[in-house]
Amino acid sequence: MTAAAIEERFRAAKRASRGAARLTSTQKSEALGAIADALEANSARIIAANAEDLQRGRENGIGDSLLDRLALDEARVSALADATREVASLPDPVGEVVRGSRLANGVRLEQIRVPFGVVGAIYEARPNVTVDIAALALRSGNAAVLRGGSAALSSNMVLVDVMREALAGLGIDRDTIQTVDDFGRDGATALMTGRGFIDVLVPRGSASLIETVVTTSTVPVIETGAGNVHVVLDSSAPDDWAREITVNSKTHRPSVCNSAESVLVLRDAAERLVPLVGRALQEAGVTIHGDETVASLLDGVVPATEDDWATEYLTLDIAMRVVDSLDDALDHIDTYSTHHTETIVTTDVRNAERFLAEVDSAAVYVNTSTRFTDGGEYGFGAEVGISTQKLHARGPMGLPELTSTKWVGRGAGQVRR
Amino acid sequence: MTAAAIEERFRAAKRASRGAARLTSTQKSEALGAIADALEANSARIIAANAEDLQRGRENGIGDSLLDRLALDEARVSALADATREVASLPDPVGEVVRGSRLANGVRLEQIRVPFGVVGAIYEARPNVTVDIAALALRSGNAAVLRGGSAALSSNMVLVDVMREALAGLGIDRDTIQTVDDFGRDGATALMTGRGFIDVLVPRGSASLIETVVTTSTVPVIETGAGNVHVVLDSSAPDDWAREITVNSKTHRPSVCNSAESVLVLRDAAERLVPLVGRALQEAGVTIHGDETVASLLDGVVPATEDDWATEYLTLDIAMRVVDSLDDALDHIDTYSTHHTETIVTTDVRNAERFLAEVDSAAVYVNTSTRFTDGGEYGFGAEVGISTQKLHARGPMGLPELTSTKWVGRGAGQVRR
């Protein structure tokens, strides 16, 4: 019964995706505007549903930070509406002619950007993702099938209902936005194995959620996420850049994936930089997990274990290690990095270019903070996520990364000789 | 033991991929030239190994067409060498600046084309694919781990050995080209689940092989392949275009994926076009599997069953159906197509544009043969395969589709405010 009911929703999403693909930019902007207005108009209903989730969460003993992520109030609903209006103003990627040519036989060939069709999303207990993904999918001409965490079930069901009603009010197929939240785990499993219905699946959340989705799915997945991000301080690193870039990379917003988690200091510069950078970090409230050399140069260091090199803390903690050479730094990164973002502070052009060429990460920097790996910073207007895989999209993804292409050929009777 | 031995090869490939990524275009051309020369110089050894495969194949009773695909002689080895030299002359996609900008804070940001790293391939008993994929992977700066069919085991082992020796002779890491053929099914399974080692996996072969790879793999896969390709003859289709395009699409090379498998004729034109196009197909040796209307308008029609609409014949057979409207044609395609290539013959601009917009296939044409969906025809110089998925690449893939990108940022101490 459940399987059939889920498949019926997938079929409805697939049907709706054909209509969504043909909506003009203007129609999509209007739809997103209507969704934003509807969210605000239904604020009380949304907050009431959210209160049920919060109540259940408290009964189940979920932590304060999770409760905070889950909570919606009038200001947060307004922020969701505003974010939706911002998505409405983004350039529409659909219809872009990516390349084109006239073949020798006269056939006019164009590669055109088209929507994927149906975008699936699996994420955790953050109701804002429900609206965020639906809006991004719709702006790029896709239908969306959503599966949020069970902790946000009541909020998500109402948010989806409000968005669907807003679409229907404009004569747009409400099935363009679907949820399978009410099917629990079965909904998630169906999304991961929905070949023929789900064109691409985007997981958002913890490393374990992403790992489950990537290893279970038979539909194509865009892997987003984990950032065990490194700052390398070369022998030539100037004091001020070393200090400012390391502190900014760690402390500007420690809970996000582009924050630094490890600092590698070249041995030649250890005596100069470990105390200088270490104290600046400590003054900013950071706990340093250091190797023996670091501990010998700086007070208050927690001894680092092998685990520290591989840990994405997402807190005011950082691992610090002294390495003998740039080669050792590159080896360390190759062993422990999640290939998200790494930066080197150096004035040596050879070391800078080696680092940029040899570090195999989505974003590699010289003399900048790691915090720049972000769709907004890159000028994309919005961010679909940060891809850590190499297929399709790598690094910050904007709306074009939620599209595919098709080849369109126009001829006058040409056949192949 | 086997698992450890396979992992050791994967590790070696990963190590080698770092060197491969840094080879210049010139070095890669020289390496491919050396491989081509080595293939010719070792022709006798390759043919002797191939004879073992053929002998085993005959003993196992494999069919003549499979034996023919498997067989290598001096001319075919030379053709392999020539194909490798052609790959050497293709433009190197690595290092292309895809886009770039200067951020508001002065950071210079570039998106650069980089190799995937390690490309895996799983394919069937065609030893030419062994050389083909290795050459394309190397030209695009990747290491390759190959798994061919067991029927070609002896040939593949020697081909890989010859290629590895040629690399070593130039001082290039021989582990850039690997095989796991000698591990049988375990090798294939390891490739499909080699997360952290295999950056992308390309299956090549039958629909069932591709289905197995797509549903089993936990590494990213580029799905290539199956083509249940449609020709639609609109009411306005001119006689000559309808006849020539249909016959060319079916008969130019029936065994390949871009050949037509079904013709849909609009009812208004059925009396005119079914006999005209049907007889032309029959004169070209094609068996027509038709619905009742087709059978009433043409002699020698085999009654079509539901299965015929879904069949990729790859032979001189075609399914023919009369549909009431363009909508019905679009619905039929949506139900049965493998989303590879479809074409419409029409002079009605509204129908042409609806078809191009609404058919959800990798390539959609107006008034051209379906046979143009081909990397060579598109001007790519070589073809990695034809992707029927929407992620990463769709339609004919060239060398750039064997690469990823990375973001490179160069700053002067910028931090995020």
Image (spheres, coloured by chain):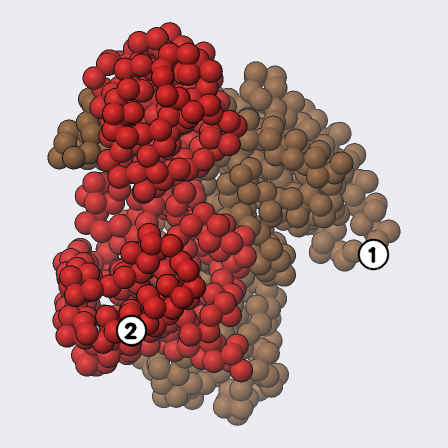
Chain colours: A red, B brown
**Location of residue A12 by image quarter:** bottom left
| Numbered mark located on residue A49 in the image | 2
Distance in Å between CA atoms under marks 1 and 2? 67 Å
Q: Is residue B353 left or right of residue A311?
A: left
Q: Amino acid at mark 2?
A: Ala
Chain name for mark 2 = A
Is A216 located above or below residue A272 in the figure? below
Is A29 located above or below residue A310 in the figure? below
**Location of residue B410 by image quarter:** top left
Q: Position of residue A107 (x, y in %)?
A: 32, 57
Q: Provide the residue designation for mark 1.
A: B61
Q: Amino acid at mark 1?
A: Gly
What secondary structure is found at the residue carrying circle 1? loop
Residue for point 39% across, 48% down: A224
Q: Is residue A389 left or right of residue B70?
A: left
Of residues B154 and A287, the one drawn nearer to the viewer in this rendering: A287
